[in-house]
Image (spheres, rainbow, N blue to C red):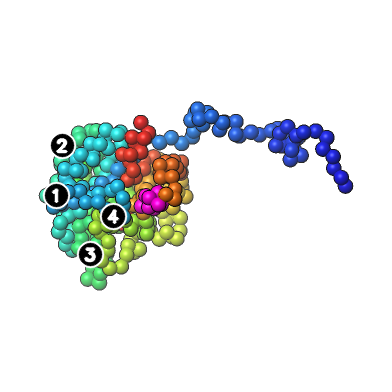
Amino acid sequence: MESTVTATPHTPAQAAGLAQFPVARPRRLRRTASLRRMVAGTRLHPAELVLPMFVKEGIAEPQPVGSMPGVVQHTRDSLRKAAHEAAEAGVGGLILFGVPEHKDARGSGADDPEGIVQVALRELAADLGDALVLMSDTCLDEYTDHGHCGLLTEDGEVDNDATLERYASAAVAQAAAGSQVIAPSGMMDGQVAAIRAGLDAAGFEQTPILAYSAKYASAFYGPFRDAAECAPQFGDRSAYQQDPAGPVGEALREVRLDLAEGADAVMVKPALAYLDILRQVRDLVEVPVAAYQVSGEYAMVEAAAANGWIDRDRVIMESLVAIRRAGADLILTYWATEVARRLS
Ligand code: PBG
């Protein structure tokens, strides 16, 4: 049958033959930049950003990290300068990783008061005061010659319970040196309880713990292992970090256990590939939730941008907005200073 057009349709709904329904026009609120700004549901603020930094013992000049263009292994001096710049930009905190000159089986540098992280923390604490939050990653992998996050048994397995004492001792050394937040990243069972007990016994009852609770055995950490010189010398971390394909409940269980052990805030890591986990953790807990936009996430964007394949600045902002929208209260990102400057 032939159809005749009787009137010019006025709305998309009429055009589709749905004139009886009210016309929905969500685009009304997207029309101008000021409208979009006013109704934005997700905002970023510099104070929610945390800058991960590397400080290396025994170097005279900062060393660029090949797989992380723009990131360096700092000298103690360049670290202080970059920390000041972060504070000036309004960045909320920094998290420090140490790269010691000498490594051994028990990771002695991790709790040595003269170890690189402790020395650097004392200098930063004296320098920065309360300008930003000084945090420290608590783990052994940067300090062990085998590159694993804990002590090894004779068979070469990571010895969970023997490692806990080392973590507690490292946490106390970091707190004594001026770290204001202890962030255990080793994924040993019971690590938060052990560290809490150690801190309390040493008089650091007021030092909070930000637990890397849901931390996956991720290939996205590749570039970090260049930066921190901590690639495992054999095997991988799958027996202690979570399986990316593991049950979602495992992440929630880790989070619950860490809170029961005394964690003050929890973390999901990596970020972009685990936004579903981040959302579920956010919905489960009342404490602040952090997400770590890790080295591989950074490297992929920088590499694609260097090739002219993506708009670097927009991709950075979009990824941070996505992480924030999925539920992160805090975001650890290597772009923290740059983004903080852009936001203010
Ligand atoms: C362990 C630690 C790692 C990262 C943060 N803390 C490496 C690992 O678990 O192998 C990765 C961070 C990143 O990739 O940016 N101390």
Q: Hey, what amino acid is under mark 3?
A: His
Front residue of this view, candidates 65 and 215? 65
Please report whichever mark, 4 or 1, sits nearer to the chain's N-terminal start.
1
Residue 16 in sight from this viewpoint: yes
Please report whichever mark, 3 or 2, sits nearer to the chain's N-terminal start.
2
Residue 39 in sight from this viewpoint: no
Q: Position of residue 171 (x, y in %)?
A: 21, 49
The residue range painted magenta reads: 299-307
Q: Hey, what amino acid is under mark 4?
A: Gly
Camera-near label (1 vs 3) is: 1
Furthest residue to the front? 308
Residue located at (35% from left, 38% from top) = 339
Q: Position of residue 118 (x, y in %)?
A: 16, 47
Report the residue marked by disc 4.
66
Report the residue marked by disc 2.
126
Question: 341 above or below 258?
Answer: above
